[in-house]
């Protein structure tokens, strides 16, 4: 679902590659940031019906006494059980997509950067005019995840649920390399954002052409 007046850019990459950092940089260039994980965390999981379904399916330990979903406990369950992960995604993803539809439908001539960890895994390419993948080397990736408090064993489990990073890079329209400094990543984002915004203002409705860097 691609808008004919908005510019909708999908941003993905592996865990620990710097997607969120790049997304903020796009926002600094005037893109409106939509974070799929934030929608899940702040809008979908607080829904009492969603919390009730999770507690019933994944066990009472996944819901706190106040009715809120305990995301850490949910993660422990679903990353060990593929069937539970599939069930959870089928519960959450339609609600996220409905929210996207609402956000995009209310906007006109707006440039969006949409951070989506599982963009290619879930076949969401058609939602976007252009896709971007942030990549880094595996050692750097694991180091960043460990700095977030994710132990190596759990990091490997979670990464195994995603497409290999090299495949994501092949599928994306553009790749951002995040092996160096923050300024190096910002230079790449600024260059790409400028080309995307220029192409958006010049394109006929429904067509986007971005010149090579």
Image (spheres, rainbow, N blue to C red):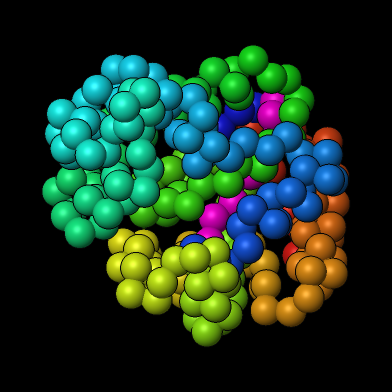
Residue closer to the observer: 52 or 138: 52
Query: What residue is rendered at 78% in x and 75% in y?
Result: 181
For residue 18, above or below residue 25 = below
Q: How many marks?
A: 0
Residue 186 as seen in the image, left or right of residue 70? right
Residue 109 visible: yes
Residue closer to the observer: 137 or 38: 38
Query: What residue is rendered at 50% in x and 72% in y?
Result: 146
Q: What residue span does the magenta drawing correspond to?
A: 5-13
**Outermost residue toward the bottom in this view:** 139
Name the spot of residue 88 as percent of width and height, x first: 26, 39
Name the spot of residue 56 as percent of width and height, x first: 15, 29
Query: What residue is rendered at 54% in x and 64% in y?
Result: 148
Residue closer to the observer: 55 or 201: 55
Q: Which quarter of the figure has residue 206?
A: top right
**Outermost residue toward the front in this view:** 65
Assign the C terminus to one quadrant of the image: bottom right
Q: Was residue 6 drawn as part of the magenta stretch in this picture?
A: yes
Residue 94 visible: no
Name the spot of residue 1 as percent of width and height, x first: 49, 31
Q: Was residue 103 drawn as part of the magenta stretch in this picture?
A: no
Q: Main secondary structure of the magenta part?
A: strand
Residue 82 as seen in the image, left or right of residue 150? left
Query: What residue is rendered at 74% in x and 79% in y?
Result: 180
Name the spot of residue 41 as percent of width and height, x first: 48, 35
Residue 210 as seen in the image, left or right of residue 97? right
For residue 100, above or below residue 152 = above
Q: Which quarter of the figure has residue 17?
A: bottom right
């Amino acid at each position: 679902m691609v808008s004919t007046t908005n510019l909708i850019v999908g941003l993905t990459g592996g865990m620990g590659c710097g997607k969120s950092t790049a997304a903020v940089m796009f926002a600094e260039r005037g893109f409106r940031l939509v974070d799929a994980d934030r929608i899940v965390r702040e809008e979908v999981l607080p829904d009492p019906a969603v919390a009730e379904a999770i507690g019933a399916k994944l066990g009472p330990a996944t819901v706190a006494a106040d009715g809120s979903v305990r995301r850490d406990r949910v993660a422990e369950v679903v990353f060990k059980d593929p069937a539970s992960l599939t069930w959870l995604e089928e519960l959450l993803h339609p609600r996220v997509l409905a929210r996207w539809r609402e956000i995009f439908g209310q906007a006109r001539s707006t440039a969006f950067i949409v951070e989506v960890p599982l963009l290619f895994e879930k076949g969401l390419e058609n939602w976007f005019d252009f896709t971007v993948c942030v990549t880094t080397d595996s050692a750097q990736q694991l180091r960043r995840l460990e700095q977030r408090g994710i132990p190596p064993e759990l990091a490997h489990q979670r990464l195994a649920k995603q497409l290999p990073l090299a495949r994501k890079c092949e599928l994306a329209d553009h790749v951002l390399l995040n092996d160096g400094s923050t300024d190096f990543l910002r230079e790449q984002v600024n260059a790409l954002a400028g080309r995307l915004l220029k192409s958006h203002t010049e394109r006929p409705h429904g067509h986007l052409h971005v010149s090579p860097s």
